[in-house]
Amino acid sequence: MGSERFQIRSEWADQNKKNNPPGGPEFPGRRSFFVVLVAAGTALVGALLSIPLIRFTIYPWLADTTKPHGAGLGPTSDFFSLAAPLLKTVTVTHEDGWRETVAQKPVYVTAGTRQGSEDGVEVLSSICPHLGCEVPGDNDRKQFVCPCHNSVFAPDGSRVSGPTPRGMDTLPIKTQDGKLMVRFEYFRQLVAEKEVIG
Ligand code: FES
């Protein structure tokens, strides 16, 4: 029994020597294991390094298409008891993916209670809801009159006549630290209901 076990061990030893002769090439199984390990490590490091690059590349698709910012119009006390719409210019910053644009937009502060009123004050976008022309106030007529297709709006921005499908759009406002703040938004044109698009 003992000599039989010795014989088996001796055969294993011979086999091992044959596979790994001194000074000869390494056992092929072990070498393959290291090759796989190095390849897996390289792939893992490559994947980890590529994450920031992928996030950087796809950020514009994941980010909000446009991100409007609020703008201050001045102390709320400036707008108590407005006798006529007051023209103000706001600086509008929009982020769109990687691009940031800054534009000056005229708005009108009016005494009104149509929608979104803050202490009896509303702010109207000057962009015509018909096809987007800028609407000026007509002091003589005491109305807003669009120069492009002659749409007419009352001092509170409601529609009077013309091809415009709705009145001038009111903008979201709030009072903050005693100041009237407005968030400039863009609305879909040629539709009867106000719809924010950016
Ligand atoms: S764009 Fe104002 S009426 Fe057409």
Image (cartoon, helix red, strand yellow):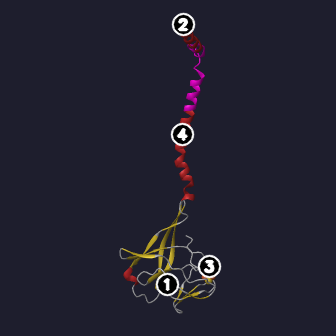
Residue range of the region highlighted in magenta in the rendering:
16-37
Q: Mark 2 sits on what residue?
A: 3
Residue at the image position 46 percent from the left and 82 percent from the top: 122
Q: Are marks 2 and 3 in contact (CB under 8 Å)?
A: no
Instruction: Give the residue type at disc 2.
Output: Ser
The secondary element bearing badge 2 is classed as helix
Q: Residue 140 appears at what percent x and percent y?
A: 53, 92
Q: Are marks 4 and 2 in contact (CB under 8 Å)?
A: no
Which is more foreground, mark 4 or mark 2?
Answer: 2
Comes first in the chain, label 4 or label 2: 2
Q: Of helix, strand and loop, which mostly describes the magenta segment? A: helix
Q: Residue 101 appears at what percent x and percent y?
A: 53, 66
Q: Mark 4 sits on what residue?
A: 44
- Using the numbered discs, state the Cα–Cα distance from disc 4 to disc 3 in whole angstroms: 53 Å
The secondary element bearing badge 1 is classed as loop
Residue at the image position 52 percent from the left and 43 percent from the top: 48
Instruction: Give the residue type at disc 1.
Output: Arg
Instruction: Give the residue type at disc 4.
Output: Leu
Would you call the spot at circle 4 few (<14 residues within 10 Å), some (14-19), or many (20 or more)? few
Comes first in the chain, label 2 or label 3: 2
Q: Mark 1 sits on what residue?
A: 114
97 above or below 106?
above
Q: Is mark 2 within 8 Å of ligand 1?
A: no
Query: In the orientation shown, which residue stands out farthest toward the front?
Result: 1
Comes first in the chain, label 2 or label 1: 2
- Using the numbered discs, state the Cα–Cα distance from disc 2 to disc 3 in whole angstroms: 100 Å
Query: In the orientation shown, which residue stands out farthest toward the top?
Result: 3
Q: Is residue 30 magenta?
A: yes
Instruction: Give the residue type at disc 3.
Output: Val
Q: Mark 3 sits on what residue?
A: 191
